[in-house]
Structure formats: structure tokens, C-alpha cells
Image (spheres, coloured by chain):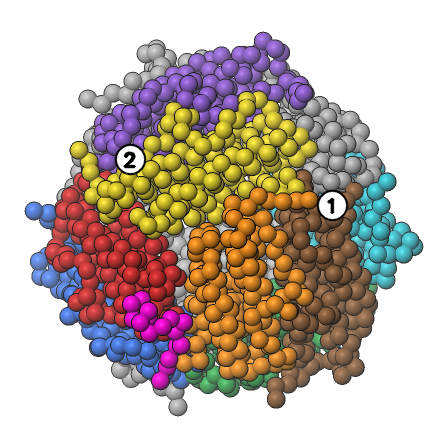
Chain colours: B cyan, C brown, D yellow, E orange, F purple, G green, J red, L blue
Amino acid sequence: MYVVKSPLSDANLATVSEALQGALVDLVDLALVAKQIHWNVVGPRFRSVHLQLDEVVSTARAHSDTVAERAAALGVSPDGRAATVAVGSGIGVTPEGWVDDSAAVRSIVDALGAVIARMRERIAATGEPDPVTQDVLIQVAGDLEKQHWMFQAENG
Amino acid sequence: MYVVKSPLSDANLATVSEALQGALVDLVDLALVAKQIHWNVVGPRFRSVHLQLDEVVSTARAHSDTVAERAAALGVSPDGRAATVAVGSGIGVTPEGWVDDSAAVRSIVDALGAVIARMRERIAATGEPDPVTQDVLIQVAGDLEKQHWMFQAENG
Amino acid sequence: MYVVKSPLSDANLATVSEALQGALVDLVDLALVAKQIHWNVVGPRFRSVHLQLDEVVSTARAHSDTVAERAAALGVSPDGRAATVAVGSGIGVTPEGWVDDSAAVRSIVDALGAVIARMRERIAATGEPDPVTQDVLIQVAGDLEKQHWMFQAENG
Amino acid sequence: MYVVKSPLSDANLATVSEALQGALVDLVDLALVAKQIHWNVVGPRFRSVHLQLDEVVSTARAHSDTVAERAAALGVSPDGRAATVAVGSGIGVTPEGWVDDSAAVRSIVDALGAVIARMRERIAATGEPDPVTQDVLIQVAGDLEKQHWMFQAENG
Amino acid sequence: MYVVKSPLSDANLATVSEALQGALVDLVDLALVAKQIHWNVVGPRFRSVHLQLDEVVSTARAHSDTVAERAAALGVSPDGRAATVAVGSGIGVTPEGWVDDSAAVRSIVDALGAVIARMRERIAATGEPDPVTQDVLIQVAGDLEKQHWMFQAENG
Amino acid sequence: MYVVKSPLSDANLATVSEALQGALVDLVDLALVAKQIHWNVVGPRFRSVHLQLDEVVSTARAHSDTVAERAAALGVSPDGRAATVAVGSGIGVTPEGWVDDSAAVRSIVDALGAVIARMRERIAATGEPDPVTQDVLIQVAGDLEKQHWMFQAENG
Amino acid sequence: MYVVKSPLSDANLATVSEALQGALVDLVDLALVAKQIHWNVVGPRFRSVHLQLDEVVSTARAHSDTVAERAAALGVSPDGRAATVAVGSGIGVTPEGWVDDSAAVRSIVDALGAVIARMRERIAATGEPDPVTQDVLIQVAGDLEKQHWMFQAENG
Amino acid sequence: MYVVKSPLSDANLATVSEALQGALVDLVDLALVAKQIHWNVVGPRFRSVHLQLDEVVSTARAHSDTVAERAAALGVSPDGRAATVAVGSGIGVTPEGWVDDSAAVRSIVDALGAVIARMRERIAATGEPDPVTQDVLIQVAGDLEKQHWMFQAENG
Amino acid sequence: MYVVKSPLSDANLATVSEALQGALVDLVDLALVAKQIHWNVVGPRFRSVHLQLDEVVSTARAHSDTVAERAAALGVSPDGRAATVAVGSGIGVTPEGWVDDSAAVRSIVDALGAVIARMRERIAATGEPDPVTQDVLIQVAGDLEKQHWMFQAENG
Amino acid sequence: MYVVKSPLSDANLATVSEALQGALVDLVDLALVAKQIHWNVVGPRFRSVHLQLDEVVSTARAHSDTVAERAAALGVSPDGRAATVAVGSGIGVTPEGWVDDSAAVRSIVDALGAVIARMRERIAATGEPDPVTQDVLIQVAGDLEKQHWMFQAENG
Amino acid sequence: MYVVKSPLSDANLATVSEALQGALVDLVDLALVAKQIHWNVVGPRFRSVHLQLDEVVSTARAHSDTVAERAAALGVSPDGRAATVAVGSGIGVTPEGWVDDSAAVRSIVDALGAVIARMRERIAATGEPDPVTQDVLIQVAGDLEKQHWMFQAENG
Amino acid sequence: MYVVKSPLSDANLATVSEALQGALVDLVDLALVAKQIHWNVVGPRFRSVHLQLDEVVSTARAHSDTVAERAAALGVSPDGRAATVAVGSGIGVTPEGWVDDSAAVRSIVDALGAVIARMRERIAATGEPDPVTQDVLIQVAGDLEKQHWMFQAENG
């Protein structure tokens, strides 16, 4: 049986692993949602929204990898499978089909807002038990809040 | 209501869009499954399997984008959301938790095999109605079969 | 007198060379038309349309080179001179002067639509006599249809 | 006391150094103003305006460096300090706070227009006394007029 | 109605816009002619001439873009459409079909010579009304005269 | 009226936005001061000081962008205009004219010292209300202190 | 005993594997022959022929790798050993020793012609049993026919 | 006598400088140990272990530079000499001579474990006196723990 | 008749040209053998062996080019044709078909050993007659011995 | 007899060709002189002076190529042979042997000063007969005057 | 027990392995000493000395890797551990603490001098038994002697 | 008085420094001669000869720098001034004016032949006194002999 000896106490590890697993699910879903809208957006702002969404995808993919490997580094198996994501994500349902650009912007603003709120709770929860994990989540939140601003500004 | 006038007849479009939507779901899931094993693999071949799986992820992500945008180009809204993928993928369930390297290799061999079999059916189905789509799927199959060989060879 | 011994029969060569010469003229004109609108577009979407049109230019230039050299490879002299293009292009007249962004998008959607329709006929005509040429034209059509979708979505 | 022996006569040097110092102040301010709007713009064209303004910043920064070092090469100390810029710039006051995208475009069109008008006077003044300096200012004016056109076209 | 307020007087603008429109037509045609010969040249010097002609194409394309956008920057709509080019170019008719390498070199020497002569007239005409435009045309002439020399030397 | 809903309470937002606005002004001024000395330094160490100062400029410019966009992400309009900087910067007056290399080094050591002291206060103030902002300021301080050391060492 | 389960029926696999093994031998030999002439060519066109031949080498090496790995992907062991190549290649004997440039061009034209003819037969044979393999061979033929044209034109 | 005025109180400086000096010695030794095993490893996993160890070397070298320059920035002379490292490192003795791959993996797992444990103590100690230093050490720990996981997984 | 006047005496030239021709044949065969195993290897170490062999291919191809052109530089026609290689190589027969990873490693260890032994004899033979050639062969031997070590260590 | 038909009248050509030939000789010598001091400088500023001189070499070499090819483009054979340069350069004799850093700086300041003075005369002489050549010389003078300033500042 | 069959006789191997192990220890220490001074140097030449020392570090690290892997290639286990280096290095003790720039230069001149003297003995000793190793050491000596000159010149 | 303590005895140093100074003069002249012909060549092979000569220039410039700095590393002041080169070069007089391509090739073949002959004498002379210098000259000779072959082959 494979066991990594974690540098954290059991209680701290429980807190931190919950935060990381939650962050992983949110980030994997964020990448899928942003790609979905990236493909389905229509309207006069198609190009701007289409391209800006791909930056969200890149950010979410890079951070999901970091978060999952941070869990592994603490001896916790990360779970980023489709079914797990479909059930556990903090992002509401994205409607199917074409979406006009204004609705697309509102949709990603909502998705980012939901993920950011949960990420800030995780930052608060992990600072004490594991500042290394907290620092990872701070980077995530900073990047998501920047994207959040840019789509809100696009809403103007 | 947004409508792209498709260059295909309705019947042909139905065939082609089913093939593309199916390919999209399989490829998105393949990327998620390969990442899942990439994070959870353990054993003496960890590094080789971990790195080779990231090539599968890159291939699957690039092709899923091409396939989804090919659907959009034909006037068909692509659906790559987590719930759609969780339900519709041709890949069997990936077990949770750590996986030793031999099982990891078998698992990705099976996943690739399942996707390839369906992709070959789609190649057969689309040649007549839309050779442009068929050519996209041929590229996909060629890349997946190369990965399939390399993991089978790793099984030796 | 310079003669390349073509690998095709005379009848097949006639079919294929007509397809290639037609594709060449369309692609050279598409690059000129896209540049013309790239320079003359005005309106709130100036930057998006201006930049997206340069992607059409790059695509059309690259493919026109491939198509012309494919003709040469079959022993057929390609003709991409301005007068030939002015007379033979499948794209309708582009009006002179400034063009607002909505009209610009409609204009390039029409131009791409006209070229794509002819390109699909050429794909159908060349598959039997020369699958190598057909494959070139399939790549061309795939790229043009992607641009076509993006401008139609911009019209959204 | 540090003295560079200038290749110009005193009268010519006076003319040229005034032109260069004026250009320096205008260009430093242009970079600051463009960054200010880059951060504060909101509205449906946020992304296009935000990105295009960063091209103005890059252009203005590169040219301010060239202009300042051209002054130094003639033995004239350049002055690009904040207080000097705040007082001497040819650009009118940029209002504080968020700015909607249409106002942002008008604002940068005005700023560029003001700088260009002064730059053209400097080109006229320096041709006789120092064609090397004039050539630098011609490059500056050419680049600014290109940006000016693109924002005017965006106003469309 | 879209109007860019030009920094030039009406009389100067007329002179300068004629020069730019003429230069644009010549450069677009030069790129087409050079590509035509690039594809059709045969003979022992095929590779040298084929490759050198692509440098002419690159130069002509880059300068045509600069010239067209310079016109736009002055408020003048540029016209680079195939029919305009076919009628207005200063380059004589390029014969159809294969061309042996010596004739190819003579042909491009003539084409470059014709464009250079007209470009030098434009330099003379624009210096007074707009030194910024003149500087653009000087760069164009310098690059074309370099290509002219290299093909003349090849004729040696 | 454009309003970003900030993730922070009003009190916390007041503290954090004051820190970010202060940091922005200091960093914009630091870039201007470092460029000023970069152009005006003379003496046997000219090259070393000239080049090292450009690293300060790059660092200060990059961080001012991050800091301003962090403010925007929290719903606070950043102000980096010349007049604001001239009044609000924590850096003392930089004398006009040429400066010998030893004085140049002392001058930038003082400027960096002043900014660092204020930046450390901001780090202390923002840790509680917004750890994401604090992390940004910690990166800023770390980079400035590295530059501070290198110029102090140069003073030897 | 290592066995890859091929996605093809036995009959189809026999056809496809024969095509791939034949293509592999031809391409390995083409690379060796082109290098041989690359080293041994002399005459006034030395540089052009020497360099153009290295493009043939690059093309042949890249395609031989793709073809061999395509065979492996179908469960067929590829054989590219020197003795196999010496016996099975479709290219006639290349004479030893120095070769003047005209003979060198004729020699590579013949070699390319022989390989292309066989490659076209393989394209015809594989389309039905395995369109993925056929697509690989179409790419090969397209690239070789382009090289064939350029050397024929050089013969011009 | 060269003195940098540290931004920290004497007590805080003592704590922080001890942490940085300790980290420096550990990181320099880690780079030496990882190179030692990189050169001496033998066994079926040679290539994987050999390459993965070079990533440890790169990480350790980059961080040792950052840590040493952080000490200098606080006015503390860093000491990374061989004798200091040989005496002060937290890593146990690495045996001389060839080492089989399994022992190599265990050896680097132990070395990383020892350094990580000390690094976590330093993170705890420096948060209060100097958050800038703490942030540096958090980055170090995060990278080392990632390597630690990958070698443990290899042990799997 | 083409003759390069060699800088060596006839006796020295005979020695050196024999060494170079022998080295050429060995290196061309080494590249073919390494590619053959690269395609045919199977087993748990597939990825490591497959990739490491491609480094041997790159090394052997680069050196074969250098060696052949060194011969040409001395006025000696190099012979790297398949039949010459099949007969003259110092490497024993590589069996056809799939090869498990351990046998693959042994096979390439033997091939490298055979080539190295002959290369060392050539180094000894050429030092006196032509130190320039000897230096080329020393580089070859150094690179091959490094590969030899890495595969022996893999055997470990 | 090879003759390029120059676009200039005979009188203008005489003026311009004298300017270009003079510029060529000065620039070739400047590159040689700067390299000579680059190799021979000693003293505490060795590194700064050594590196800065290589920037002079790069500038002088690039401009000498442009100037020579500009002459050729006008039908004038350029002469940059060592003997021509040794006799015709405007730079005084550089003493042999090691040179301390202060003398090195003075030496290159003098060399640049001499070349600049002559280059400014050439700018004045060529504006009328050939503005294209004048523009080339303006670029040369601008770059040399920048280097001149930097070495004068180093003299401080 | 792992044994590489060395291509050298036992006596030759003893000589060569002693040379390589000695070179390894010297080069590892040289990198540590150069980094130590790189961090601790102060004085008006800080930047030049700081940067130049990092070139020594890069050179020493690259060569230590080559030398260690050369030993391994001959079947000799290399030893680059801190304790081995601390005891066996040919470089004298580097004093702790800050070092002014002149002393820093003298220190590295001495260190390079000591290593070079020993390296030249190794070149003399290895030429007969193993010219491949000798060639490696010649490259090392050439690079170190270049650095030696530059620091001696800096001493000027 | 600046003195580098050379690692060589006085007698050996005299031999080696004569070789290096001679090589420097030949290489500087070779670069000048190759550039001279590069600018003045005319004829049907203009492009091939023009480009190939620039490779000679690059090679000669890179080696002249290495050779000069090798002299400096031994404590010998290198002399690469125009007058020294004009008098001391081993290359015969290059005639002024345009040169047809065949004569150009013969001219550079002669120049390379002259330099190579002297370089081989220097290799023979320096092996005993300084193998490091000899190795530098062997690299030089190898590169020049390769160029020599290519121009002889061009002579065919």
C-alpha cells in the first residue's frame, strides 16, 4: 500500500486536503465551462470574449495541475474525474447551446465569482495548518480575481 | 436566433454532428482521465508513465478544440460540459486513488482502445457526407493510435 | 520546351489542374479582399475585425502558395497575376472606400462563403483523379470554414 | 563640470534641444496617460481598448528613451521627472476614475492629436539644424499617427 | 460619414495621397508578379531565383501594408483590390506560363526598375508636403533598389 | 455607474486600496526617477550604473502594472497620472542635470530606501484584510530590496 | 510474445503492412541517396544542389519515422536495417564517386520518380483497408512530388 | 567597513539570518548530492533517475542563489563555501561509488526529507520577523516537496 | 575530372581517408541500427530506451555528416550508400522483429562498443598524418563513449 | 563589362559614391579599431569597456555592410580592402600594445568623433542628389553619436 | 557489482581517472568559490565583478558535468561530494564575509591560477593514455585561461 | 606596466605568440577579402557565391576573436589593426572592382588555400609548446578546409 508520510498532523492534513480537493474540482470545472462558452459564444463581441475565455482556460488548467500535485505532495490522492467534477463543482449549471456575448460575459463573471468566494475561504482555512498550500491558493485567487475584473469591466 | 447556414444537407449534417459531438465527449474525457492517472500513478516507472500521460493530455486537448470548432463551423453547438462528459464518454470508470504503474498503463491502454474503436466508426460514417470532417477525425485517430502503441509497448 | 511528366493521365490532369487554378485565383483574391477591408474598416469593432482579417490574409497567402506549387508539381503552370485574378475570382466586387464594421463582417462572410462553395466542388472533383490534391483542398476548406464560422458568430 | 562637445552650433543646439525636451515630456506623459486609461476603461469594448492602449504605452516608452538619449548625445541633459512632465506636457488633463470605453477612445484620440501637432512643429524646426534629430522625430510622428488612425477608426 | 481630420492641408493631402495610392498599387502588383515568377521559373538557376523572389514578395508585402496604413493615417482610404491593381500598376504585363531563369531575372529587373522610377518621383513630390510619408517611401525605395542590384548582378 | 462588487468589507477595502494606491504612485515615480538618472549619469562607472538602473525601471514598471490591476480587481480605480505622482510620491526630489556616478548611486539608494520603508508598512497593514494583496506587495518588496542591496554594494 | 491487437482485419493488415514496409525502405534509402549526392556533387551549381538535397534528407527522415511508427501502431514490426534497405529499395544504383551537378540533379529526379510511383500505388491500395495509413502516405507523396518538381525545374 | 542598514531589528535580523544561512547550506549541499547521485546511479531506471535528479539540481541551484542574495539584501554575508557546507548541511553522508537505482531513489528521498523538515521550521520562525524572507522559503519548500513526492512515487 | 588538391601527402591521405571512410560507414549504420531498435523495442522500459536511442541517432547522424564532409575537404569521395554500409559496417547483425527492452539495451551496448573500438584505432592512426581529422574523430569517440556509459548504466 | 544603370545623374552619382566609399572605409576601420582596443584594454573598467566596444564593432559592421551594398545598388563598386582602409580611414593611428581603460575610452571617443564629423559632411552632401543614401547615412550618424555620448559619459 | 569495461589498460586508466577526479574536485570548488565571491563582493566595481563571476560559475559547472561523465564513461565513479571537495580542492581558503572588489578580483585570479596549473599537468599526463580525455581537459583549460586573462586585465 | 604571467616558458611563448599573431592577421584579412568579393561579385551564380562568402566572413570573424583572446590569455598583446593586416596577411592582393562569379570563386579558393597552408604550419609548431593553442588552430583549420572544399566543388 502506497503511503506518503505527510509533513502535516492528521488534523491539519484533513483541513488542507479538503481545501485542495475542493479547489481542484472548481478549477477543472472552470476550464471546462470557459471552453464551453469559448465555443458557443456569438455576437458582435465574439472575438474579444472568445479569446479572453481562452486565457481563463489556460489559467485554470495550469492551477488545477499545481493544486493536484500539491495534494499528491502531501500524500493525498487528488480526484479530477468528470463525474467527481460534475457533482462537486461550485459553479452553477451552464446552459447548453449558443450564447450571445452579453450572456456569455455574465455567465463567466458568475462562475468566477463562485469559485473566488470558495477559494477565499480555503485561503483562510489553510494559513495556519500549511502556509505552503495557502500560498498556492493565494496565487490562484489573485489570477482569478484579475480575470473576474476584466470580465466585469467588459460588462461595464 | 443564431443560425449558421451549414454547407451540408440536413441528413448529412445529422450524421456528421453526431460524430463530432461523440468525438468531443470522448476527447474531453480522455484528457481528464489521463490527467487523473498522471497525478495518481506510483511505482518504479512513475516518471515515464507520468510524462507520457501528459502527451496524451496535450493531444486530447488540442484535438477536442479542433473537433468542437469543426462542429461550430458546421452550425452545430458543441457540448463539452462536465455532466455531458460524465454521462456520454466511451471510456469506462477510472477507479479513484493511487494506482501502481502497471495498472496505470493497462488503464490508459483500455481508455485509448475504447476511444479509437469509436473514432474509426466515425471515420467510416463521415467520409461520404463531409470529407473535411473525416480528415479531422483521421488525424485524431492517427495520433491516438500512436499513443496506444507506445503504452502497449510499455506493457511489453 | 519545359515539360514535367505528370503522374496523372491527361483526363485526370485536366480536371485537377482546373481545380487548382480556380483555387489559386480564389485564394489570391481572398487575401487581397481581406487586406482591403483590414485597411478600410471603421467602427467600434475596428480592432477585432482588423486583426481577425489579418488571420484570413495569412491563411489565404499560405494556401495560395501550396496550391500553386501543387499545380507546378503536376506539371501545370499556375497563374496568379492581378489581371487573371481580377477576372476569374469567385468573390463579388468589394466596394471602394471606408466600410463600417458590420458591413465589413458581412462582406468577408460573403467572400468566404463564395470561395468555400467552389472549394467543396473541387474536393468532390479531385478525389478520384488525385487524392494528393484533394487532401490539399480539404485542408484549405477546413481552414476557410473555421474563419467563416468566426465571422458569422461575430455577426451573431 | 561634464560637457559633451556638441556637433551643432549653439543656435542650432538651442532649437534642437528644445524640440527634444518637449518631445520627451510629451512622450513620457503619453505613456502615463495611456496606462491610466488602460487600467480604468470599462464597457463592452474593454478588451480591445485595454490591449490597444498597451501598444501606445510600448511605443511611447520606446520613443521617449530614444529621444532622451538623442538629447544626451548632443550634450543636452534630458528631464523626464514627474513634476516636469506634470507641468510641461501638451496633453490635457485626464479625468480621474473609471472611464467608459467610448470616452476612453475619445480621450486617447485627443491626447495623440495634441502630441502629434507639436511633434510636426518639431519636425519642421529641426530639419535644418540637425537632420539626425529630425529623422528620430519623423519615426515618432509616423508611429503616433498610426495609433491615432486606429483609435479614430475605432470611433468610426 | 467617417472622416479622419488629416494633419495636412487639402493641397498637400492631394499630393501625398496620390503618391501613397500609386505606391500601394505598385507594391501589391510587385508581390503578385514576384510570386508568379517564383512559381513558374525553370532552369539551372531555379533554386536561387525561386528563393530570391520570395524575398521580393516579403519586402513588397510588408511595404504595401505600411503604405496603405500610412494613407489611412492621413484620412485617405487605400485601394488595393485586384481590379485596381490590374489597371493601375506601373509594371508591364508578365507573360503567362513557364519562364526560363534568365528571362525570369530580366523580368523582375524590369518590374523593379519600373516601380523604383515611380517611387523616386513620389519621394521628390512628398518631401515638402509630408516628410513622414517621404520617409516611408525612402525606406521602400532603398529596399527595392537593393533587390534591383542583386538581380542585376545575377544578370552580370 | 460602474461598480465592481469587492470581495472585501468596506473597512478592509479602505485599508487595502490606500496601500495599493500608495504603492502605485511610488512605483510609477521610481520608474521615472530611475530613467532620469539612467539618462543623466556620467563618470567612470557610467555603463554599470546606466544598465543596472534599467533593471530598476523594468522591475518598477512591471510591478506598477500588477499593483494597479490588483486595485481594479478589488473595485478601486487606480490613479497613476503624472500630477498625482508628482505630488504623492514618497521619493524626494531628484535634482536636474547631469549627475556623477557616485551621486547617482546614492540617489537611487535613497529612492529605493524610501519606497521600501513605505512598502513594508503596507505589507504589515494588508496581511489581515487581504492576504492576496499582501502577497503582491511582498513580491514588490523582495525585488526592490534586491536592487537596494546591489546599489549599496556598488557604494561599497 | 509481444502482440499488439491490430484494429484491422488480417487481410487488410497484410495489405497495409506491405505498403508501410515498402514505404519505409524507400524513404530510408532516399535519405541515404540524397546524403550521398549532397556530399559528392561538384560543379557551378554545387551550393544550390547541396542545400536542396538536404531538404530531401530532412523530408525523407521525418517521413520514414512516421511510417515506421505507423506500422508499429498497427502491430507490425518495421524493418529499416541497412541490408534490408540495400536489397529492397525501389531506387536504382547510385554510382560511387564525385558527380557533376547536372548528373546529380538527374539522379535525384530519377530516385524521387521511382519512389513516387510506388507511393501512389500504396495510396491506391490502402484507402479501403485503412484511411489513416492512406492519409500518412498522401502526405509523403505530396512532399516528395514537391521536391520532384523543384529538381525537374532545376533541370529546366 | 561595509554595512548595509537592515530594515529589520537586531533580534529579528538574527532569527532571519540564521534561517537563511541554514537554508543556503542545505540547498548548496542538496545540489551537490543530487549531482553525485546523477553521475553514479546505475540500474534499469538509470535514465529516469538520472534526468529527474538534474531537475533537483536546477531547483536547488536557483533557490540557493535567491536565498544567498536575500541574506545579502538584509545586510548579512552569506557563506556557501565547501567547508561550511561539508560541516553544516542537514543532509546525511552520501556513500561513495556507484549506487543502484532503488538505493539512489531512497537516498534522495531521505535528503529531500531532511531539508524539508528544516525548511518548515524556518518558515515558522521567519513569518513574524520578515514575511518577505518567509515567502522565499515557502517557495523553496513547495518546490522541494514536489520533488519529494515524485521520488516517493517512484519508490511506490 | 574533378580533383581537390589535398593538403596531405599521398601516404598520409591514404591512411586518413581509410579512417574517415570506415568511420562514415560505422556511423551511418549506427544511426540505422539505433532507429531500428527505437521502433521495435517493447517492455516496461520502452519509453526510456526509445527516447535514449533517438539521442544516439542524432549524434550518429551529425557526426556522419561531419566525417563525410571532412573526407570531401581532403579530396576524398565519401561513400555512405546502403549497400556499402550493409557490407562494411563494424556492427554485427541486428535481429529483425520486436525486441524486449533488456535485449535492446544489450544490443546497442554491443553496437556502440564495436564502433568505439574501431574509432579508437582510427584516432591512433590519424594523429600523425592529420591532427585535424584526428580531432574530429576524438569528438566522435567522446560522444559515443558517453552514450555507451549511459546504456551500460541502464544495464546496471 | 558589368554596368548597373544608376538612377542618378553622373554628377549626383559622383558625389554620392564618394560619400559612400568614404563612409565604408571609415566604418570598416572603426570596427577594426574597436576590436583592437576590445582585445588590448586593461584596468579596473576592463569589463565595461571591453563589452561596450563590442557594441561599436557590431554597429560598425552592420552599417559597413549597408553602406557597401548601397553603393553597389547605385552601380558603384565598393572597396573595403585592408590596404584601402589603412590608407583612407579618417581615424588616427591606434597605438600598438596594451592600453589602460582611461586611454582606451579617450581613444574610441576620438575615433568616433573623427568618423562622425566626416559622416555629417556626407549627410549634407547627399541630401540633394540622393535622399535614399542620405537616409542611410543619417541612421549611421545617429548610432555613432549615441556610442560617442556613452563613451564621453564614461569619461565623465 | 556494476563494472564498466574500460577501453583503457589498467595503468592508463589509473592515470586518467586520477586526472579526471582531480579536475572534478577543482571545478566543483571553483563554482562554489566564484558564487561565494559573487554574493559577497562590494565596491564601485560590484556589478562588473558580480556578473563576470557568474560566467565563471557557468563555465565551471558545465565542465564539472562533462568531466564527471567522462570518468563514468571510462568506468570510474566520480566523487563530487562537499566533504571530498573541501579536502581535495587545489584552491586555497576563501575568507568569509564581505570582500571589496579589488580583493575579489585578486582572489579569483589566484583561484583560477591554481586550477589552471593543475589542469595543465593533467593535460600533459593524459595525452598518451587517452587523447579523448585530454581533449576534454584542453577545452577546460582554454576556457579557464580566458577567464583568468579577463580578471587579470580587470586588475590592470 | 601590465604583465600577465604566462603559463608558458619564454621560448614556447615566442613560438606560440608568433603563430597566434600570424593567424590573427590572416583571419582578419580573410574576413575583409570575403566581404569585398561578397559585395563585388556579379554573374549567374551571384546569389550562391554572395551567400556562401558571408559564411566565410562569419567563420573568419569568430575565429579571429578566439585567436586574439587566446593571445591575450597568454599575456601577448594581439595586433589586428588595418595597417598591420595590410602588410602582414598571407593572402595575395584582391583586385578592385566588380568580379565575375567564376573569378570570385577562384579568388576565394586561393585566399583560403594560402591561409590554410600557413595554419597547418602553425598547428605543427604549437603542439609541443601549447596544446591548448594548437587545439584552437585545429578548429580554425577544420572550418577553413570545409569552406575550401565547398568553393572548390563550386569550381567543379
Q: Which residues are magenta?
A: J1-16
Q: Identify the residue at horizontal 43%, vertical 56% (top origin).
A: E127
Residue F108: percent from the left, percent from the top?
Answer: 31, 26
Residue D29: percent from the left, percent from the top?
Answer: 45, 32
Against L62, residue F81 (above or below) is above
Where disc 2 sits, the SS reads loop
Q: Is residue F136 visible?
A: no
Q: How many marks?
A: 2
Q: Of L133 and E95, which appears nearest the observer?
A: E95
Q: Which residue is tagged 1?
A: C102
Q: Say whether residue B146 is magenta.
A: no
Q: Disc 2 and disc 1: Cα gap in Å?
A: 51 Å
Neighbourhood count class around disc 2 (C-alpha, 10 Å): few under 14, some 14–19, many 20 upward: many
* Residue type for callout 2: Ser
Q: Which residue is tagged 2?
A: D77
Image check: B78 left or right of L26? right
Residue J91: percent from the left, percent from the top?
Answer: 18, 58
Residue L15's image quarter?
bottom left
Q: Of L38 and L72, which appears nearest the observer?
A: L38
Q: Chain of mark 2?
A: D
Where disc 1 sits, the SS reads helix
Q: Identify the residue at horizontal 56%, vertical 66% (top origin).
A: E26
Q: Of C31 and D96, which appears nearest the observer?
A: D96
